[in-house]
């Protein structure tokens, strides 16, 4: 067939009206767009791991209150009602009469009773029944104690504040790591969304190639092998598109799980995160990272615990006051009584327990110091590694852009030559595949740059800048 007949057949094929398709179903309701900033804010309030961390912080806030309780005033009240098996009582004279008996009373002088006998005797005029142990006995007491000089309690309160700060810094670092993971998920979803767009363009190109190959084959200028290859390429492109769409939905589901919400949202391609500024990022990491601060607080806490043990060598002085009630008052002029005083507690010898505790805490101080230096070293190494990763990612992205530009130009030239009959279908297919690989590589390298930037921000401890 001559070139004129071929192009005429091509025009007729394109002018043939397409079969009428049934009307498309009404579009699904548009999903809410979730931005990166909204995802981070949502993770702060809805992520289940962060909610657990917040609960730990609230629990840690009670450490100081518990420590203060050993120094603040304490009031205890006690009461008791008891029924005894027996009632113990006896009679006591409550008045006396003096009577003249007319004769001398008592033993003669020189007996066991001192003095000389007289005519007078003393006789009870009335008798009262006195109860020592009642059948039902009621007692009660209210007691107030207040520490005046308590060296251990003072150091204990200081250590409680240090422990609270240590937990707070550890929770801050864990929260940052979770938010870093959420940002990674978001950028991953965005990358898969871009990859799906690339695959959709690939499907459109392969369908056009298949249509051209079919027209050529029907016109007699193409081979059956070329048409089969075009159909294979189209099927492969549709398979890749479906796979990328499923990967996108799976990644979006993972993001929704991290936010504790349904995966009924769309995302937007986020802007590239800003790299941390400053000439000495390693020093910034030592100043900003919460885990570094937590290690320093843990060392200070270990030293404070040894100081608290030293304080056990000193005495403790406290004041107390008590107000009591007893239902029986035979030997007490009033059923209500009070008592105030001072108390001193001083452990002189405890069998060497304090000395052993001091040696144990000294070892823990050495352990905390080594751990702090290890955390500092890891923080510096993370910054260095993140900087190297970012440099490599930036360089790879630049090459990917160059390769994509060349692949686009090559695909354009081959497409023109193929339509003019100057290029084979294999050359056209290779150009399309090369372009697809270049575009996919560019998407991947762009994601690597964003993730490397986030990693550097997280390593420096300046991740909060991403949320501005």
Image: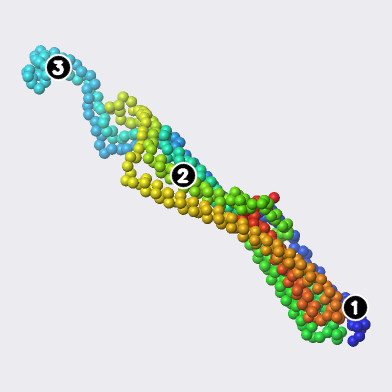
Q: Could you tell me residue 249's position as x and y percent? A: 68, 65
Q: Could you tell me residue 257's position as x and y percent? A: 62, 60
SS at circle 3 = strand
Q: Is residue 376 above or below residue 93?
A: below
Q: Quadrant of residue 415?
A: bottom right
Q: Could you tell me residue 319's position as x and y percent? A: 39, 32
Q: CA distance from mark 2 to mark 1?
A: 89 Å
Which of the numbered marks, if any, corresponds to residue 11? 1
Q: Could you tell me residue 351's position as x and y percent? A: 32, 46
Which of the numbered marks, if any, corresponds to residue 451? none
Closer-to-camera residue (413/191): 413
The residue that mark 2 highlights is: 304
Labels 2 and 1 touching (C-beta < 8 A)? no
The residue that mark 3 highlights is: 121
Front: mark 2 or 1: 2
Q: Is residue 429 above or below residue 330?
A: below
């Amino acid at each position: 067939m001559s070139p004129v007949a071929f192009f005429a057949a091509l025009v007729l094929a394109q002018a043939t009206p397409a079969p009428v398709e049934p009307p498309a179903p009404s579009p699904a309701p548009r999903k809410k767009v979730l931005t990166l900033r909204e995802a981070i804010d949502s993770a702060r309030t809805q992520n289940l791991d962060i909610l657990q961390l917040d609960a730990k912080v609230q629990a840690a806030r009670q450490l100081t209150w518990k420590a203060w309780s050993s120094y603040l005033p304490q009031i205890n009240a006690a009461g008791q009602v008891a029924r005894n098996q027996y009632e113990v009582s006896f009679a006591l004279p409550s008045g006396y009469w003096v009577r003249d008996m007319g004769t001398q009373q008592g033993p003669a002088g020189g007996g066991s009773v001192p003095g000389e006998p007289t005519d007078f005797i003393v006789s009870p005029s009335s008798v009262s029944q006195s109860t020592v142990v009642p059948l039902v006995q009621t007692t009660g007491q209210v007691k107030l104690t207040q520490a005046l000089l308590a060296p251990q309690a003072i150091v204990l309160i200081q250590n409680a504040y240090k422990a609270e700060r240590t937990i707070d810094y550890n929770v801050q670092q864990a929260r940052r790591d979770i938010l870093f993971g959420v940002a990674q998920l978001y950028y991953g979803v965005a990358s898969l969304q871009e990859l799906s767009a690339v695959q959709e363009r690939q499907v459109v190109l392969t369908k056009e190639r298949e249509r051209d190959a079919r027209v050529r084959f029907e016109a007699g200028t193409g081979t059956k092998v070329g048409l089969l290859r075009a159909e294979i390429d189209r099927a492969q492109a549709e398979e890749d598109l479906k796979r990328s769409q499923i990967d996108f939905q799976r990644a979006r589901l993972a993001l929704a799980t991290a936010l504790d919400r349904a995966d009924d949202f769309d995302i937007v391609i986020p802007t590239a995160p800003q790299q941390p500024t400053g000439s000495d990022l390693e020093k910034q990491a030592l100043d900003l990272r919460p885990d570094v601060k937590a290690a320093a607080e843990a060392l200070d806490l270990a030293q404070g615990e040894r100081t608290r043990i030293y304080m056990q060598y000193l005495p403790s002085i406290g004041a107390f006051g008590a107000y009591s009630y007893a239902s029986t008052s035979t030997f007490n002029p009033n059923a209500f009584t009070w008592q105030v005083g001072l108390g001193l507690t001083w452990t002189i010898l405890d069998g060497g327990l304090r000395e052993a505790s001091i040696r144990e805490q000294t070892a823990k101080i050495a352990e905390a110091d080594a751990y702090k230096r290890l955390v500092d070293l890891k923080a510096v190494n993370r910054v260095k590694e993140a900087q190297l990763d970012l440099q490599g990612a930036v360089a790879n992205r630049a090459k990917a852009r160059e390769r994509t530009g060349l692949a686009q130009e090559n695909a354009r030239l081959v497409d023109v030559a193929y339509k003019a009959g100057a290029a084979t279908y294999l050359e056209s297919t290779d150009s399309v595949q090369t372009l697809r690989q270049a575009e996919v590589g560019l998407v991947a390298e762009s994601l690597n740059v964003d993730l490397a930037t986030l990693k550097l921000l997280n390593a420096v401890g300046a991740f909060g800048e991403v949320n501005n």
